Image (cartoon, rainbow, N blue to C red):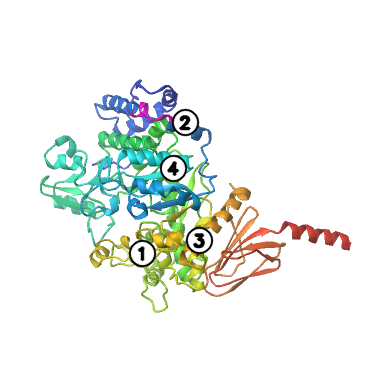
Amino acid sequence: MSTAQGLPAPVRSVPAATQPAFSAQARSRYARHADSLTQLLSSLYGEREDFQQWLARFLDRLASLEQARGEDLRELDQRRLQDPDWLARSPGVAYSCYVDRFAGNLAGVRERIPHLREFGVRVLHLLPFLKMRQGANDGGFAVSDFASIQDGLGSLDDLRELGAALRGNGISLMADIVLNHVADDHPWARAAMRGDAARQQYFLTVERRDEVDAIEAHLDQVFPDQAPGNFTWNPALARWVWTTFFDYQWDLNYQNPEVFAEMALAMVHLANLGVEVFRVDSAPYIWKRIGTDCRNQPEVHVILRALRVVLDIVAPATLMNAEAIVEREEILRYFGEGRRECSLAYNAALMAATWVSLIAGSAAMVRDTAAATPQLPAACVWVNYARCHDDIIWSVLRRDIEARGDDYAAILGGVARSLHGQDAASYSRGVPSQSHDPLHGTSGMTSDLVGLRDGDEDSWRRYALVYAVAFAMPGIPLVYMGDELGQGNAALPQRQAADDTRWLHRPALDEAALAQRHVPGTTAQRAFSLMQWFQQMRRQLLDRASGQAVEFLAGLPQGVLGLRRGMCRVLLNFSGTPQRVALADGDWRAYAPWQDAPRIVRDALQLPGYGQAWLWPDAEARVARARSSMESK
């Protein structure tokens, strides 16, 4: 394992470019990107004596996959090359779900396309569906085979047919590519345990316990209760295997070029089956440097840039979405310089800050976090969300809180305890995630975290408030399955809840609620209409304020977040008490969820507790007022 403090030194001379058998279309792209790809890979692996031979073999395998790419996908490649910011301008939403919980299997997902279309989905994120480890598998993130579908979910043909059907309905398929690790029953791991020396080099292992202890001294723990430590003793290898996550997930050794090649080719194979966006799972961890926390190392970005160039050559329509739940300054690096790495990234800090502000009754945390969120390079997009399949990770806010001189543990500990229902006045029904330490994370569906109750207007306003942030800020909103119907936490067996609390917010889609989404007075109808209303507001934002930076309004009550995008103003009251907001510059039409018609306001607006208003200039009133003023003169 590398102990160097910088990037590996590039080779003294770049190996001569080979001429792999790409198609005519890809040949020109290869000519454009070959030098960049070679330089990136040589900076990682160029000191190896066999580098040039390895590169030639890799490119030949890559060309074979490119030749197999379907004509419909080649046409998509051409369209996306001509319109690189298509996603940033899309009026739709992203939607995230597990295949089995949403529709049983891949064929069932295809049958639910009408629901996705009605809901306005533009990107469908199907959580892990590749063949996964038997038994415990971290929700499918312990992959046993990157070229097979999990038993019971369908086949590769089902995936190809689903991708084509989604594409025909204007929906892009997003899938996970787990870069950091494979399951311990993956063929590579099994071969390593049988004594295959080549496969053993696919993994990171340590011989002695004292070496483990020295490395561990610099590392955090992802699952401190369920999977303490970052190494697992393997008797077959008689060595400690690096296992950052669970003990059955073996970290891959990216200092071995064969690992890079296999993972890059796995991505291209899935892209050929119709995957248009890759959620790059666990990206910060993929390069290890002893003596550091082994996250966000410079080589991580070299690897991601190289993967981006591979896709630029063979599947340029395909995007990469960084699953990097780290501090904001680190997340920005995953976009590269002008989309040289990922095109999307989760705005985890904004999501966590939204919950802090909700519990605190003050807009300060979400305002400061949103104001510090920079405008991204062209064709790059934030993924904004209220909840997802994973826990709320509070550490993404630590640097911001401590930079203000505040006590991180006191502030976030209080927020977490409230969300976990541990305060007498708490309305939330979340639980601590993966640890007895409340600061580690929080699990729960949106509706239970806001204490959603039928007939309780405050809880409905809270529900709308946390999603308003996701829809109002620049980026694409992500709606987690069930939130469009107001679904709550899953009922879990005690053992499953103890093993992994995240299953609490992974319920099956409620068929009865789905059938009631248009039935007035039902929870499902109210939640569904809310999400459709937000999409209407966002379409207006894109039409009238696309590309314009967010401005944050000053002089507002402490509980109110006010932002301006183009002609629109959005006012969000994180306080549970009514707040008066002065409006000194004209006539406005004020829209709010579940409001039959806009209110016409001029001097001031009264926001109810947890209320919100989206204001657009009332052009007719302003013209009339101007005309009246002229006539009076």
The mark nearer the N terminus, 3 or 1, is 1
User: Which of disc 2 and disc 4 is earlier in sequence?
Assistant: 2
Residue 442 is tagged as: 1
**Dot 1 crowding, Cα within 10 Å, few <14, some 14–19, many 20+:** many
Cα–Cα span, label 2 and label 1: 43 Å
- Marks 4/1: CA–CA distance: 33 Å
Return the disc, 4 or 3, that comes first in the chain's sequence: 4
Closer to us: 531 or 10: 531
Q: CA distance from mark 4 to mark 3?
A: 24 Å
Quick check: marks 4 and 1 in contact, CB under 8 Å? Answer: no
Q: Which residue is mark 3?
A: 518
Distance from the alpha carbon under mark 3 to that under mark 1: 32 Å
Query: Of callouts 3 and 2, which one flags the residue occurring earlier in the amino acid sequence?
Result: 2
Per the image, the residue denoted by label 4 is 166
> Could you tell me the amino acid type at mark 4?
Leu
State left or right for residue 504 relative to residue 397. left
Q: Is residue 571 above or below residue 262?
A: below
First reached walking from the N terminus: tag 4 or tag 1: 4
Disc number at residue 75?
A: 2
Classed neighbour count for the residue bearing mark 4: other residues with Cα under 10 Å, few (<14), some (14–19), many (≥20): many
Check if mark 2's residue and mark 1's residue have beta carbons within 8 Å: no
Nearest-to-viewer mark from 2 and 1: 2
Report the side of 628 relative to 288 (left or right).
right
Mark 3: few/some/many CA within 10 Å (<14, 14-19, 20+): some
- Name the mark nearer the viewer: 4 or 1: 4
| Along the viewing direction, whichever of 523 and 390 lies nearer the viewer | 523
